[in-house]
Image (cartoon, rainbow, N blue to C red):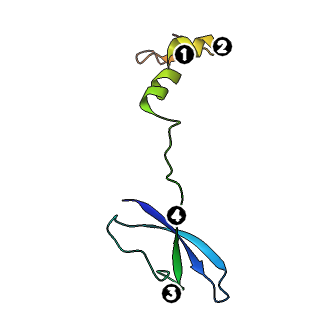
Amino acid sequence: MPVYRYVTIEPDGSDGEIFEVEQGVNSPSLKLHPESGKNVRRIYDSPNINTNYTPGKEKLLSDMARIKKAGFRVIEKDRISGKYFEK
């Protein structure tokens, strides 16, 4: 379900608390704050699409050759002896 942002409208007409509500796409917009009962209006933001951690980028960043080229040592634990060795 999408998360929508709302802001409360203070008695003097200024913006108050910003809060988020998980609602269905076809649900009507809130008119009142669920806890305080103050009037609210919905805030329209750009969508939050995170492209920093896609499966392709994760695979690229975890490539052993790339890790070793960056100067890191890759070690692995032997299941039988419990000792670590360089991979």
Give 78 or 21, whichever is nearer the viewer.
21
Residue at (42, 74) in percent of width and height: 29
Residue positioned 46% across, 80% down in the render: 34
Q: Which of the two discs, 1 and 4, sits closer to the camera?
A: 4
Question: Which residue in the structure is indicated by mark 3?
Answer: 37
| Label placed on residue 40 | none
Bin the neighbour count of mark 1 within 10 Å (Cα to Cα): few under 14, some 14-19, many 20 and up.
few
Q: Earlier in the sequence, mark 4 or mark 2?
A: 4
Compared with residue 57, is residue 31 higher up or lower down, i.e. above or below? Answer: below
Alpha-carbon distance for marks 1 and 3? 57 Å
Q: CA distance from mark 1 to mark 4?
A: 48 Å
Residue at numbered disc 2: 71
Look at mark 1 in the image and give the residue it sits on: 75
Kindly identify the amino acid type of the residue bearing the numbered disc 4. Answer: Tyr
Q: Quadrant of the N terminus?
A: bottom left
Disc 2, SS = loop
Residue 5 versus residue 32 in the image, above or below: above
Q: Is residue 85 visible?
A: no
